[in-house]
Amino acid sequence: MTYVAASDRYEQMQYNRSGRSGLLLPAISLGLWQNFGHDRPLDTSRAILRRAFDLGVTHFDLANNYGPPYGSAEENFGRLFRAYFASYRDELIVSTKAGYDMWPGPYGDWGSRKYLLSSLDDSLRRMRLEYVDIFYSHRFDPDTPLEETMGALDTAVRQGKALYVGISSYSAQRTRKAAAILRRLGTPLLIHQPSYSMLNRWIEPELLDILGQEGIGCIVFSPLAQGLLTDRYLKGVPEDSRASHPGSFSREMLTDETLAKVRALHQLAQRRGQTLAQMALAWTLRDPRVTSALVGASSVAQLEQNVAAIDKLGFTPEELSEVDRYATDSGINLWADSSLA
């Protein structure tokens, strides 16, 4: 069946500039970290991607090892892109990353030139694309010279395989150094992708200031703290939740103290006329240095609810003060080893 995108898709979304670049990104972007691997029905992935674009979500974010199994999110995206989105390629921003383990041996992990450029070639084959719009170094590699890692990103652009480059989970000072290296090479650092949420505010003391000074955009991932900032855990741990089985989110994060914060934030969201998830997303976008918030989705309904966060982005000073009472670090930054290196 031929897919025709909604004619009003650009009327429904807010678009923000990425730093001082020429690129605009939707306030809400769709991440394919979860729910798009071979363990999920392709029909569901298709419905989510098509509905996202109909709502003005023009940015789809992937990485080489998204799945499961590794690579399968890119493979599924490639199949769906070719079937439904090929004619809209110039209207889409597609990003991918390399930096975590992907294949066995010494050349399938971290930040070497060998790994990054080989991985990008593989990603392009899986997604059936000639280029990606943004290629990221997925994490800082303490054992590879930063000049080598940034040089590989520069090469990807010069080879025509990426239009822009970014980094993810880099510390403030590493970000400044990476930006300087790329500036000298002639390929500006477009964007940084850090974890950020009401319960994980590590980017506020330094990183946001540096991004603003350097003219680098910011797209935050895990803005819902992997589902913790939703109504799913207000009454315990559902059997089908991430915390109910082994993975990136564990029951150890669900302390009484953290759940008390979540319940208090939920009450504020109700008074604002939003779900907790919608308020949490709006809160991450309150700072003009934050370009976009990445959301995942396991259903069209969940996607629609998250995108509706843009309907109420403003906060009163009193609301922000109340948020600050409960929005404190809760020990959930799984990416601290990279972001603090």
Image (cartoon, rainbow, N blue to C red):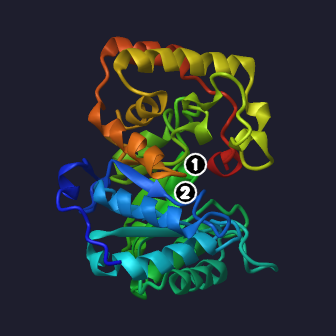
Q: Badge 1, how many Cα within 10 Å: few under 14, some, many 20+?
A: many
Q: Is 291 displayed left or right of 253 in the figure?
A: left
The spot of residue 125 in percent (x, y) is 54, 87
Looking at the image, residue 217 lies above or below residue 23:
above
Does the image show residue 277?
yes
Disc 1 residue type (three-letter): Ser
Which image quadrant for residue 149?
Answer: bottom right
Disc 2 residue type (three-letter): Ser
Q: Residue at x 46, y 50 (%)?
A: 294
Residue topped by disc 2: 168
Q: Badge 2, how many Cα within 10 Å: few under 14, some, many 20+?
A: many
SS for tag 2? strand
Which image quadrant for residue 202?
Answer: top right
Quarter of the picture holding the N terminus: bottom left
The spot of residue 330 in percent (x, y) is 66, 27
Looking at the image, residue 235 lies above or below residue 115:
above
Does the image show residue 181?
no
Residue topped by disc 1: 171
